[in-house]
Image (cartoon, rainbow, N blue to C red):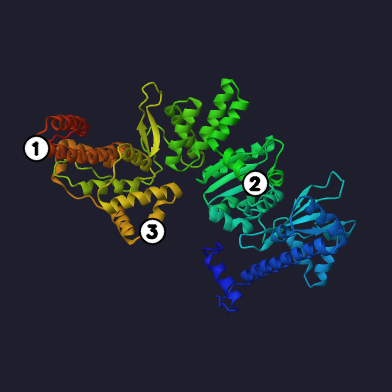
Amino acid sequence: MKHENYSYVEALRYLAKKYNIEIQESAQTSEELKLLNEREALLSLSTFACEFFSTILYENEEGKSVGLSYLKERGFTDSTIDVFQLGYAPQQRDSLLNYALKKGYTLDNLEKSGLIIVKQKEGSILRYDRFSERVIFPIHNFSGKVVGFGGRILTSKDKNHAKYINSPESAIYHKSDILYGIFQAKNAIKKADKCYLVEGYTDVISLYQAGIENVVASSGTSLTQGQIKQLTKLTNNITILYDGDSAGIDAAVRAVGMLLKENLNIRIIILPPTEDPDSFARNNDRQQIVDFFSDNEKDFIQFKINLLSKEAGKDPIKKAEFINQIAADIASIPDIIKVSLFVKQCSSLLGISEPILFRTINKIRIKNYKEGSNEKVNESQEVNTNSTINKPLRPIYAELIPLNLSDVEKEILFLLVNYGSALIYVPTENKQSEEKALPMRVDQFIFNNLDSDTIQLETPLYQQFINIYADIAEKYPNEIVNQLKNHPDKNIFSLYLNLVDIKPLPSPLWESPQIKSFINTIDNNKAKLHEYIVRCLHVLRLIKLRAIREKHEQELNNTSEIEDISMILKKLVDVIKVINEIEKALGVTYR
């Protein structure tokens, strides 16, 4: 399963076939059997057709003089032709049809596979091969089975004939789910943990032959979600390598938008205007290709800013439009850490302040959320009413002197598990801004605060849990709860269950009117979630700062050196100043 990226069932069947072991499967319905039999029949027919086209290429006079000579002119070796199982479809329009019928394949399956075309003309039925006078590029699925074909015309001068045609959709071929070259490239992609994405068949083959084997193509179509899913089985690092002309750049822009939404790490290489990946690979050796790729790889911010400088020039309106496009791309990224880094980078390169970029990004996110939801969001609320806040919020302890650090750390984990994906509105620090608050996920807000103060949880299991949560949030931002529910570490899973089932315990610290008022507010007004989280984080800081103060006081008692006393006193004054500020914000006192 790991080596070939097979599913469990595919791996079983592969091994059973290899070692002649009979698999006893549960009884299938007649409909299931019909679909299964049709799929297997079409796969068998596609393999047969692939062998037919290959035989024509090497053994038929037309195939050798037209097809093979074309491939040799392009520099493809016999080894490369064999790896990709290239072939040739002859001029005679019923050659495959007649040969397949002779070998026992049915007209029905030939039509379903798309290998033949059936038309009615003047009361009669015409049947003929879909591919003729074309070099054939077999299309393999992830496990290496031939599921379709692409054909490039060579000899016809009719302008109505498309340069490339592909097999139509069938029971085994879904163009939007297939990447050309994925079978040949998958091991190299896994090994390099990186994939080059190109547009055409010959782009893949030429790069592969030049030694760049971790390369696949979207087969001349716009990238699809199904194709992206194929890539994510192998790597999260994608480099888009498209033509240097305007069409190639436009295609790269579209692909970037789709890949960013999947939280993939995107780089872009734009070739010189006169080159495409095929010609570039044929005109350079492997080291020259590797060096060019290394020198010209850009992240999507650099890529778009380069476009901005060329297209917008000094026009402020065009520049604003382009910045909004970049903000829209950043807004589509699920990973909050990547968002922050890209904002910082964009701000530095374009001279736009980070708060302005964040406001623009958050506006886009809110708009996208509204468009993707049947329920409206009231932007004046501090909390997104569509979030899954279905438990009573618990008051954090107010008179904090006897509080245990472990309890507060657990409270932070409680917030992450139960409210991590909730949307809160955080007051902006920019006093000139018309917007008084910006939307932010709870987990993003908590991680930002912990990171800014370099706070690590002191309970080892709790710190391990928060590291795992952060990793899950980066990879599966919309599946955090499910990932935690199914986490293989028993300690993490047990802690997760404890956090979701945790119940508030009575405390004498709740009895003051101030605390009772606070409890009532957060239990009955979900818009106070932000205030509650801030208090929790303040409590965590306060306990840690009190421990630091005690440490400095002990150091002060244990030294008699004037210089050391002066240095410790300065540290102590600074710590006490921050402690007083936090205690004032929390409404608590110490001693």
Q: Position of residue 19 (x, y in %)?
A: 59, 77
Location of the C terminus (image quadrant): top left
Residue 340 figure quarter: top left
Helix, strand or loop at disc 3?
Answer: loop
Mark 3: give few (<14), some (14-19) or many (20+) Cα within 10 Å. Answer: some
Between circles 1 and 2, the one closer to the viewer is: 1
Between circles 2 and 3, the one closer to the viewer is: 2
Q: Position of residue 437 (x, y in %)?
A: 37, 30
Q: Position of residue 497 (x, y in %)?
A: 31, 57
The residue that disc 1 covers is 557
The residue that disc 3 covers is 487
At label 2, the amino acid type is: Val
The first of marks 1 and 2 along the sequence is 2
At label 1, the amino acid type is: Asn
Q: Position of residue 79 (x, y in %)?
A: 71, 60
The residue that disc 2 covers is 198
Residue 133 appears in view: no
Query: Residue placed at 53% from the left, 42% from the top?
Result: 260
Between circles 1 and 3, the one closer to the viewer is: 1
